[in-house]
Amino acid sequence: MCSRALNEWIEEVARVTQPDRIVWCDGSEREYHALLEQMLGDGTLLRLNERKYPNCYLHRSHPTDVARTEHLTFICTPKPEDAGPTNNWMSPQEARERVGALFRGCMKGRTMYVVPYLMGPPGSPFSEVGVEVTDSPYVVANMRIMTRMGKIALEHLGDSEHFVRGLHSLGDLSPERRYICHFPEERAIWSIGSGYGGNALLGKKCHSLRIASVEARDEGWLAEHMLIIGVEDPEGNVTYLAGAFPSACGKTNLAMLVPPPALSRYKVWTVGDDIAWLRLGPDGRLWAVNPETGFFGVAPGTSVKTNPNAMIALSRNSIFTNVALTPEGTPWWEGMSDPPEFAYDWQGKPWTPASGRPAAHPNARYTAPARQCPSISPHWEDPQGVPISAILFGGRRARVAPLVYEAFDWAHGVFVGASMASETTAAAMGEIGVVRRDPMAMLPFCGYNMADYFRHWLWMGTRSPRMPRIFHVNWFRTDERGQFLWPGFGENLRVLKWIIERVNGRGDAEETPIGYVPTPEALDLEGLTLSKEAVRELLHVDPNEWRQEAEAIAEFFRRFGDRLPEELWQAHRQLLRRLG
Ligand code: TSX
Ligand code: MN
């Protein structure tokens, strides 16, 4: 029943890469365990404590291969303008020559795995088939957690030639010969020289965001870097929200939020923590699915306090990458609990709290099945998706951005998303506290010119009178001494409650130059000990700060030249006018 186009492509890839063996993956439990045994045998994986972490494994990556490499990630369109000023561009011809040369014979002596996978629920009109060819068994094992792999994908494909072609090889793991190339016209991805998640699990960022964003533009939908949650109120009504946040804003924590005691009659359901595919439904509402089946989460900072649902999800059937290992064979990372007296660090070296370096890599990850998350929504695999009532854009801002505000309308909301920014945190990212623009949290993930992407967003808003309302949130505002003003975490549900009230025509707000901000009384702060002063500060919109912000936004917008939609400049002028 296998697609001829698929067979022909696999033959062609094998001719170029010359593997010793070809293995077609069926996605079965049995195949998974054989693969794990093989990796335990060759040292790719270590088995963790079977009693405390059943069926869990540790992988230590090459020390220079620990994160996505944006400077080595390319969009390969015929014209550089089609990649836009925020992407690296390489001509398809140069990519075929330069990167193609690296694939020649790269699988000699290795096994080539053919990994068919489905992004999206079985039987859903949202869903897409991809096939990743890889010489990394670690990639295959992670793909089995993150996607619907094997038989189900081939069934979806039938004899069609319509699938995303992903070619991946570890190559020699040298950063000098590392490339992640995307060919949106051919719906193809070439990745070589890295085994790291976002570079190598091609179903995730490469397919579900970069390639899918181009398809979404062409076909009239949205492929977004968003979490999806359902908030159930005490009466049992569930309101679905989607949210885009740059890194280090706690997106996975928000996706798995546990209500605080004062709102214990509410419940937050997790639909997805990273990617949303959104389409207009027959009812004119925007419906969303999570194309993935797992969480590829940052381990450091994840604890029973910050995210108890993630801790349960990752406690079995999970793969850990670059975490520390305790003498009892359990994983450990900074922020998980009090440090052990002794551990092996992410590179396997002896470590104590006095070592003066982190035990886990700051970008250490867990790969955990979504179905194991206690808050997973009963609707997370619904083929039609869930109806989205509000879109949240967020950022980490010590000042300027209030706790929450609502955009005036869709076009203004697109302006809010396009001008999003966040402050850097991790020392690994360079200086800390620097404001970086990251429109819709898509800067590293949009597969085409972001000016065109903004135009696509604006157009989507003209297609239905029932589009979601758009909000901006900031959990990270600080006082003059640098202390966080808002308690964050579960208490963020108080902000979501106001957002849901607004969507339902309630919830008091004050009109400000930047949008609708809750009145202090409109936020449910019962059981919180926040001073009146702190609330005032959290909700304050300072015209002077915002005039500076507007100039920074203009500077960013100017990078797109005359390709930037006029509506965004219009929104910018209106902001300046309202600021006086
Ligand atoms: O994930 C976070 N969220 C979202 C939660 C649903 N973090 C963790 C950092 C990002 C990876 C947060 N950190 C949040 C937040 O809302 N807010 C903060 C800032 C903060 C940190 C600590 C405290 C309060 C705020 N308070 C105490 O530690 C007692
Ligand atoms: Mn992400």
Image (cartoon, helix red, strand yellow):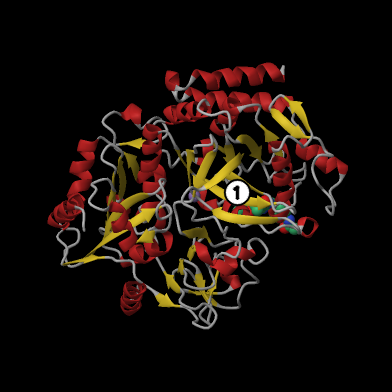
Residue 395 relative to residue 558: left or right:
right
Q: Is residue 440 left or right of residue 268?
A: left
346 lies above or below 221 = below
User: Quadrant where the C terminus lies?
Assistant: top right
Looking at the picture, how far across and down is residue 397, in whole percent? 65, 40
* Neighbours of disc 1 within 10 Å: few (<14), some (14-19), many (20+): many
Question: Is residue 434 visible to us here?
Answer: no
On the image, the x and y values in percent for residue 497 come to 73, 46
Q: Nearer the viewer, residue 20 or 554?
A: 20
Label 1 within 8 A of ligand 1 by Cβ? yes
Q: Give the SS element for disc 1.
A: loop
Report the residue that reaches farthest toward the right: 532
Query: Badge 1 is on which residue?
Result: 249
Q: Is residue 445 left or right of residue 176?
A: right
Q: Position of residue 105 (x, y in %)?
A: 15, 57
Task: Check the image and report above or below for 361 versus 8.
Answer: below
Q: Nearer the viewer, residue 144 or 5?
A: 5
Kindly identify the residue that appears in the image at 46 percent across and 66 percent down: 322
User: Viewed as shown, does residue 224 lie left or right of 28?
Assistant: right
Q: Position of residue 198 (x, y in %)?
A: 41, 53
Q: Quadrant of residue 122?
A: bottom left
Residue appearing at x 59%, y 21% in the figure: 571
What's the amino acid at mark 1? Cys
318 is higher (above) or lower (below) than 119: below
| Residue 368 visible, this angle | yes
The count of marks equals: 1
